[in-house]
């Protein structure tokens, strides 16, 4: 089921399936600012990545002594979440361990997803609680897709990714199969604030940038300065991605707190690098704030 909140500037719609934002409308122009989720291109809008990001080594994990198969980016994006609160500016959803999650990941948890709109900004907070487990380790990340071009007067060539600070973004390699090999790193660019959107930018899939100094990363319309900007402060990994189809119809800015599995890495869940490790009763949260200046 879909739920909507709005203010004078934007209208946000979130689907309880995946607790996924599926629409952000600019109320002044009527423009849709999230990707439409066309299944012929890419059938998502802004999925939550939990309890891991990317792929699992060999597509599986060993947890509590048993083997579990796992697809890309975990399961939270594919299951129903429960609406627990709705106000004029807030939507809150919860996902608890149950008969749809335990066959996929044998841990008790609470995942709370809270959306708050403030002017032209959407704040999306993910909170994880450990109710009973001696230790709860997990990965987590965001994967919003933003529609381009912003209007019919522009094309994909008119856009660039823009950092707040001068950057030489170092990337970890997950080529060609989405798993880390642990040895390959490369510079996406050197001493720049701008990464132009080009036909071949994503020819080898996404770019996973490590330890950026910038507090924000935006997709910017070069001649007007209109932009969608993500607050990436505190995120150790930030990915950019789109499909290889050209001209591009969307771009993703993806702040993550964890990485994909390794080609020859351990299968044991407890050995997988994680975003956080919670003792019984502990809580952890992170927020992605996205500002739509367009």
Image (cartoon, rainbow, N blue to C red):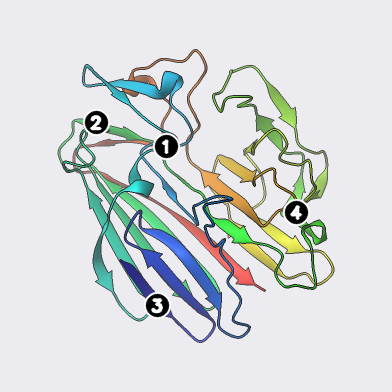
Q: Name the residue beneath numbered marker 1.
A: 275
Mark 1, secondary structure of its residue: loop
User: Distance from label 4 to label 1 (Cα)?
Assistant: 35 Å
- CA gap, disc 4 to disc 3? 32 Å
What residue is rendered at 84% in x and 69% in y?
223
Mark closer to the chain start, 3 or 2: 3
Q: Position of residue 14 (x, y in %)?
A: 39, 66
Image point (46%, 37%), residue name = 53
Label 1 close to label 3 by CB (< 8 Å): no
| Residues tagged 4 and 1 counted as in contact (Cβ below 8 A) | no
The numbered dot on residue 135 is 2
Looking at the rendering, which quadrant does residue 216 occupy?
A: bottom right
Q: Earlier in the sequence, mark 4 or mark 3?
A: 3
Quadrant of the image containing the N terminus: bottom left
Q: Which mark is residue 109?
A: none
Give left or right: position of 126 versus 217: left
Label disc, if present, on residue 247 of the rendered structure: 4
Q: Which mark is residue 5?
A: 3
> Where residue 72 sits: x, y (%)?
44, 35
Above/below status of 91 relative to 239: below
User: Would residue 158 appear left or right of 281 to someone viewing this image?
Assistant: right
- For label 2, count other residues whose C-alpha is less than 10 Å away and answer few (under 14), some (14-19) or many (20+): some
Give 74 or 116, whichever is nearer the viewer: 74
Horizontal and vertical percent for residue 42? Answer: 55, 50
Please report the residue visible at 33 percent of the width from the left and 23 percent of the height from the top. 269
**Mark 4 or 3: the one toward you:** 4
Image quadrant holding the C terminus, namely bottom right
**Badge 3: residue crowd in 10 Å (few <14, some 14–19, many ≥20):** some
């Amino acid at each position: 089921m879909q739920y909507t909140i709005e203010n004078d500037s934007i209208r946000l719609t979130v689907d309880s399936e995946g607790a996924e934002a599926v629409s952000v409308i600019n109320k002044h122009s009527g423009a849709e600012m999230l990707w439409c989720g066309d299944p012929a291109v890419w059938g998502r809008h802004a999925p939550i990545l939990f309890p891991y990001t990317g792929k699992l080594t060999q597509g599986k994990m060993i947890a509590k002594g048993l083997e579990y198969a796992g697809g890309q980016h975990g399961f939270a994006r594919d299951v129903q979440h429960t609406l627990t609160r709705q106000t004029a500016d807030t939507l809150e959803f919860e996902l608890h361990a149950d008969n749809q999650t335990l066959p996929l990941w044998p841990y008790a948890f609470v995942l709370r997803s809270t959306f708050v709109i403030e002017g032209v900004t959407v704040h999306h907070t993910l909170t994880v609680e450990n109710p009973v487990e001696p230790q709860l380790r997990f990965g987590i990340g965001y994967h919003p897709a933003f529609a381009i071009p912003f209007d019919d007067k522009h094309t994909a060539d008119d856009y660039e990714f823009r950092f707040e600070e001068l950057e030489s973004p170092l990337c970890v390699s997950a080529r060609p199969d989405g798993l880390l090999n642990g040895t390959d790193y490369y510079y996406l660019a050197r001493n720049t604030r701008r990464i132009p959107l080009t036909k071949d930018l994503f020819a080898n899939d996404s770019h996973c940038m490590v330890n950026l100094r910038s507090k924000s990363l935006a997709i910017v319309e070069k001649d007007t300065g209109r932009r969608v900007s993500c607050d990436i402060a505190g995120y150790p990994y930030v990915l950019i991605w789109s499909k290889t189809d050209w001209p591009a119809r969307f771009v993703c800015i993806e702040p993550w707190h964890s990485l994909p599995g390794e080609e020859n890495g351990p299968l044991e869940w407890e050995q997988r690098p994680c975003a956080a490790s919670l003792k019984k009763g502990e809580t952890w949260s992170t927020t992605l704030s996205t500002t739509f200046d367009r």
